[in-house]
Every structure is written in C-alpha cells, then in structure tokens.
Image (cartoon, helix red, strand yellow):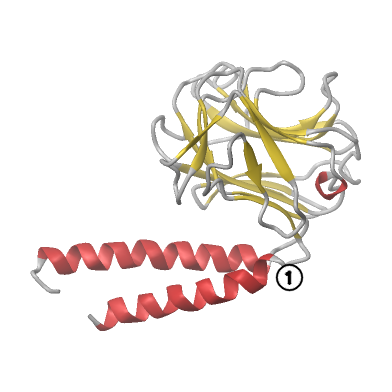
Amino acid sequence: MKSIITVLAVIALSLSVNSWALNDDEALMLYFTFDEDNGGTVKDVSGNNIEGSLEGAVWSKDGKIGGAVHLENDQQFVEVDAVPELDITDELTIQAWFFPEESQGDSNLMGRRSGANVGGYCLQWSAQFTGAPQIETWINIGGWQGSRNKQTIKPGLEEWHHVSSTFDGDMIRQYIDGKLDVEFAPPKGKINSIEVVFRIGKAQTGLPGMVGLVDEVPFTTAPSPLMKLIRIWKTAFSLLSLLMTNSLQRGVS
C-alpha cells in the first residue's frame, strides 16, 4: 500500500507541474496529444497554438494514452500549415507512439518535405529494403541522411511502439521502445530549411502513409525538461497499474 501511495504522489506532482511546463518549455515546438475529438482538427498543447487538419484520418479513443489519430488507409493524413516553429535547423527531437496495422513496402509515418522530396526531416515505415517493416529516420543535412539498412529493431504489428529520433548537431540517433537502434554521423551542417507543410500519414510526395494509429507527437529543438517529466509520469502510471494488479491478485485493497 505504501508503494501505491508513493506512486500516486509522483503522478499528482507531475500533473501539477504539467500545466506550468507546457507553456514554459521553450524547446517544445509542437505537441499533439490527440486526447480530444475536435471535429476534424487536432490542437497543439505546446503553447504555440498550432493546429492540424484531419484529411480522411479519424480520431480514435484507443490511443496509447487517451485518444489517438487513426490512419485507416494509406491515403489519409494529418496536415499542419508551413509554420516557422517546425522549420527546425539545429538540434531536433521527433517522438511518437505508433501502432502499425500493416507491413508496408515503403510508407510515410510523418515529416516535412516538398512534393519534389526536398526536406526537412521525416520518419518512414518500410519493409521494402530490409524484408521486415522498420522505422527509417531521414534528416536532410547536405542531402538526405537516413537510417535505412542500419536498423536492427523490427517493431511488431498490432502493438504500440515508441520512436524517438534525434539530431544533436553531431549525431543522428534512432531509438525504438527506449532502446538505441541506430546512431551515425551525418556530414557537418544544419538541417535544410524549407517552407513546407508537416504531415502525419500520406507524404507530400505522394508516398502512401502508414496504416495504423499515432499518438503523443512532440517536437523539440533541444533536450526538453517537459519530455523528461512526461516520461516520468508515464513510468509512474505504468508502475501504479502493475502495483494495483498485484495487490488485487493478493486480495489487498
């Protein structure tokens, strides 16, 4: 019981800080939680008041945490206008929870690039080049620099997975479910600046989108205290669920 009370205290503290942190974290450029059905739009909670439109995609209550966006086929997407907050050229962290429903040859999870495939940055979900669907991180630094054929982790279908792709000015790293999957050094330079929309799902190039659910999408320009706080909160919530399950199994109320 003491363990449960301790975890509850951690969650309460995290929630009390969250409302302050969302609008005070200068590194946080965008955060889509997908927790509410807003009638065809998705609201950013970073404080930058960015809005996305659901183009065929639908809101689902079955997210990793709260709701999610459901891309029911490979032609659907969420689109955000070309806003300066997402034209990130220095340090970058892209994160998302994704629930892939199909093995696809080559598909777009999310990204910023033009119809002529000039970026920006993007994440892809592709089996075409490795024989099994895997995440690919692509960042344009003097041309596209990607993790294709470097990955080792093969996320399973019909399961929630977390991706975190980072560029710290020196190295590109790709993490899957908290484990380092790929790291490599791109050419020296900045991420290519381009005025273009951001999409989750079908790409601006016409590349089909990943079929499945997407949840909790934050973009940061540097290591973010808020993202660390959110990870603590999620860990505490998972621990609470485990402790309560164990207590019920032992007959402890």
Q: Quadrant of the N terminus?
A: bottom left
Give the x, y percent position of residue 88.
84, 48
In this picture, residue 160 sits left or right of residue 45:
left
Give the x, y percent position of residue 213.
49, 34
Residues 200 and 168: in front is: 200
Secondary structure of the residue carrying numbered label 1:
loop
As displayed, is residue 114 above or below residue 110? Answer: above
Q: Amino acid at mark 1?
A: Asp
Instruction: Specify whether residue 123 is in view.
Output: no
As displayed, is residue 103 above or below residue 11? Answer: above
**Residue lying at the far bottom of the rendered structure:** 2
The answer to which image quadrant residue 223 occupies is bottom right
The residue shown at (21%, 62%) is: 245
**Residue lying at the far front of the rendered structure:** 39
The residue shown at (90%, 35%) is: 195
In this picture, residue 163 sits left or right of residue 119:
left
Q: Quadrant of the C terminus?
A: bottom left
Q: Which residue is mark 1?
A: 24
Instruction: Specify whether residue 90 is in view.
Output: yes
